[in-house]
Amino acid sequence: MIAPFQSRLRMAWPFAEEGTLSEIDTAATNPPWSVVGDYRVPPPEVCDLLTAKQYSMNFEFSSAAFNDHYGEDFPVDISFPGSPYTGTWIYNTDLGTSQTYNEAYKWDSQIKLFQREIDPEEDAFAVFGLAGITYIRHFRNETEEGVPISDWVFTARMSAAIPYPAKNQDDELIWRASGMVFVTLDKTEYFSLTEGGPTVTTFTYYTLTEAGSTYLGIDDLGGPGQGEGGCLPVADVAIISHFDP
């Protein structure tokens, strides 16, 4: 399945980039997702993305692996599956709400994918990739008396990342994508310097950008469970269905 649209640079639009192609080291210990292919004729993996109608996205977060790696006390394991349509973004919070952005304008054809129209009433929402999910949870650690020790905010984002043309270290033309999974944990701790004294707070931020994932069957950054102390033993983005021919 070849995209019928091309830019003036004869790259598969809308994935064309002006100027010199960047160089990506695909021989690194944990290389980023990439496939070899001429930018004028996208390889099958990129053509799949150009015709994908719906995605499967799921992750599992291991609190034991995170705590062991960072010396922390995050309280629970977390998992979440999502199946957004192309051109939509699922936003799920611990308030028991799940909202799908751009649903009325979802890209249910290849032409719509290339047009990439966003609902004008929702254009302030930060869209990312071809589709995605955002999952947010708050947790509190307390003493038996109900005194807060720490608050955590867990945020995970997964996306069907947009590929773009590049070259590898062997000067081969490739397509690569980045940013399939992005996890942050924010911790606020409460304590008193003196007994009965005022409460003091400290803040710690963890950003798991090298956790690894599997994207369309290809491991990215070593694959899930390989990076960031193995905190994400499952992190997978796959295609459920394609547009009708």
Image (cartoon, rainbow, N blue to C red):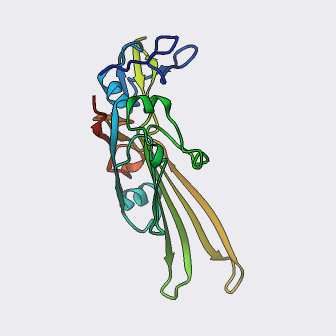
Give the side of residue 22 with respect to residue 75, left or right: right
Give the side of residue 118 with respect to residue 238, left or right: right
Residue at x 43% of width, y 11% of height: 171
Q: Foreground residue, 134 or 111?
A: 111
Q: Foreground residue, 151 or 201?
A: 151
Image quadrant for the N terminus?
top left
Give the side of residue 148 with respect to residue 179, left or right: right
Residue 163 x %, y %: 43, 28
Residue at x 53% of width, y 19% of height: 17
Residue 26 sits in which quadrant? top left
Residue 184 x %, y %: 51, 53
Is residue 177 among the parts visible in the rendering?
Answer: no
Q: How many tags in the picture?
A: 0
Is residue 124 among the parts visible in the rendering?
Answer: yes
Image quadrant for the C terminus?
top left
> In the image, is residue 241 above or below residue 70?
above
Residue 202 sits in which quadrant? bottom right
Give the side of residue 236 with respect to residue 153, left or right: left
Q: Extreme right residue here?
A: 198
> In the image, is residue 34 above or below residue 71?
above
Residue 187 x %, y %: 56, 63
> In the image, is residue 136 above or below residue 150?
above
Residue 122 x %, y %: 57, 49
Q: Foreground residue, 81 or 86?
A: 86
